[in-house]
Image (cartoon, grey):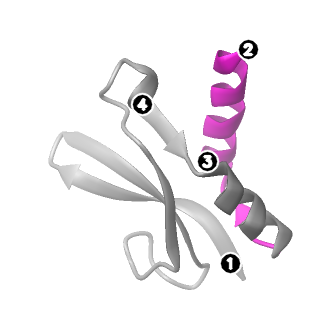
Amino acid sequence: MVKIRMTRCGCKNRPFYQINVKDSRSSRDGKFIEKIGYYNPLVISEKRFCINSSRLGYWKNKGAKISNRVLSLLKKNKKDKK
């Protein structure tokens, strides 16, 4: 099964997350299929969350499951844009 989930990057106490498409059997920071976005919780601007919506739609149509955290970020981002 393919999942869309976050991978932690960055230094100690300076988190940065990539949003990746990966096999559900791989570890959190393991091998991934495609990088489709990022989330930087330390930034207080428009560039805090970015995702390629066309690739997200493509993988959703292929049957990929979205993790709860990525889904909450998508909902929050959609609400902020209104």
The correct choice, above or below, for 13 with respect to 27 in the image is above
The residue that disc 4 covers is 48
Q: Which structural element holds mark 3?
A: helix
The residue that disc 3 covers is 70
Q: Is residue 51 magenta?
A: no
Among the two numbered marks 4 and 3 on one chain, the one whose residue lies closer to the N terminus? 4
Nearer to us: label 2 or label 3: 2
Residue range corresponding to the magenta coloring: 63-82
Q: Which amino acid does label 1 sit on?
A: Val
Q: How far apart are marks 2 and 1 (CA)?
A: 30 Å
Q: Determine the main secondary structure of the stretch shown in magenta.
A: helix
Among the two numbered marks 2 and 3 on one chain, the one whose residue lies closer to the N terminus? 3
Q: Which amino acid does label 2 sit on?
A: Lys
Q: Which structural element holds mark 4?
A: helix
Determine contact: label 2, label 3, CB under 8 Å: no
The correct choice, above or below, for 41 with respect to 6 in the image is above
Name the residue rendered at 66%, 62% in the picture.
55
Question: In which quadrant is the N terminus drawn?
Answer: bottom right
The residue that disc 2 covers is 82
Give residue 44's position: percent from left, percent from top: 36, 18
Q: Which structural element holds mark 2?
A: loop
Q: Is residue 22 shown left or right of residue 38?
A: right
Name the residue rendered at 56%, 61% in the picture.
5
The residue that disc 1 covers is 2
Query: How would you rate the neighbour count of disc 1 (Cα within 10 Å): few for under 14, some for 14-19, many for 20 or more?
Result: some
Question: In which quadrant is the C terminus drawn?
Answer: top right
Q: Which amino acid does label 3 sit on?
A: Val
Q: Distance between the residues labelled 3 and 1?
A: 14 Å
